[in-house]
Image: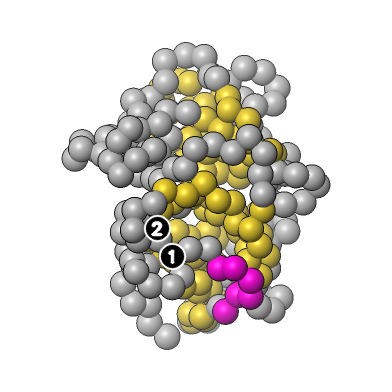
Amino acid sequence: MAITRKAVIRATYSRRRTAIYLGALMTALSLLALAPSLASPQVSPTWQQLTPTGGPPAPQGAGAERAVAYDETNNRLISFGGSTPTGALLNELWILIGADGSDGPPQWLQLATLNTPPPHKGHAAAYDPIHNRLIVYGGCLGQCSPLDSSVYVLSNANGLGGTPTWEQLHPSGTPPTPRDGHTAVYDPTSNRLIVYGGDNCCGGRFGDTWILTNANGLGGVPRWEPLFP
């Protein structure tokens, strides 16, 4: 099957297949998986439309940019925030159980969280698989402003092990310029979040790279450091 154009695309990779979570302007959500693994070049990949039970989360508007992260060990997709087609910002947490569809139809589950941050869009998130923590940085708290430079960590982020609870971190060092639309990845070996790019909501684009040490809130005070590749 071919993929039609979508207003918002978020993708995560599993070793068995690529699970892609799509939100389209003014339409229902689409969830597709690409199988077999991209690591098998002898076999042509094919798209599969997944039909999850439960939920689903609300459709998202153009530029909504909810953040997603993938727990490969438990095959769970974690989704936080974004905005609706009417512009209402969200701070909901949703889990997609059996996310890549390899074990049967996935299931959406909305989780109640404690100390929940304000609604966000355009933020970035990365998952710590060792401690089951979701790290969220930046984004927008309105339609175009204000931008948010906060860092939040969600414990029990995949819905297992206890009630998911948010904690705001207060890093030392000079922080990055506030932004949205950036990307972030997490290195569990060094407990560092790597942030790249984004924009200032007014047409300005960033091409800088930043490191947040002790990013999961454990092991010491987090610190922002610029990286000059």
Circle 2: residue type: Thr
Measured along the vertical axis of the image, is residue 67 above or below residue 208? Answer: below
Q: Which residue is mark 2?
A: 84
Q: Determine the residue positioned at 48% across, 21% down.
A: 224
The magenta stretch spans which residues? Answer: 51-56
Q: Are marks 2 and 1 in contact (CB under 8 Å)?
A: yes
Q: Which residue is mark 1?
A: 59
Measured along the vertical axis of the image, is residue 229 above or below residue 14? Answer: above
Q: Determine the residue positioned at 34% across, 40% down.
A: 142
Q: Can residue 38 be spotted in the picture?
A: no
Q: Position of residue 47 (x, y in %)?
A: 48, 80
In this rendering, would 184 be left or right of 127? left
**Label 2 vs label 1: CA separation?**
6 Å
In this rendering, would 148 be left or right of 143? right
What is the quadrant of residue 27 in the picture? bottom left
| Residue 159 included in the magenta stretch of the image | no
Identify the element where label 2 is drawn.
loop
Identify the element where label 1 is drawn.
loop
Q: Looking at the magenta stretch, what is its main secondary structure?
A: loop
Q: Earlier in the sequence, mark 2 or mark 1?
A: 1
In this rendering, would 200 be left or right of 75? left
Q: Determine the residue positioned at 42% across, 15% down.
A: 174
Circle 1: residue type: Pro
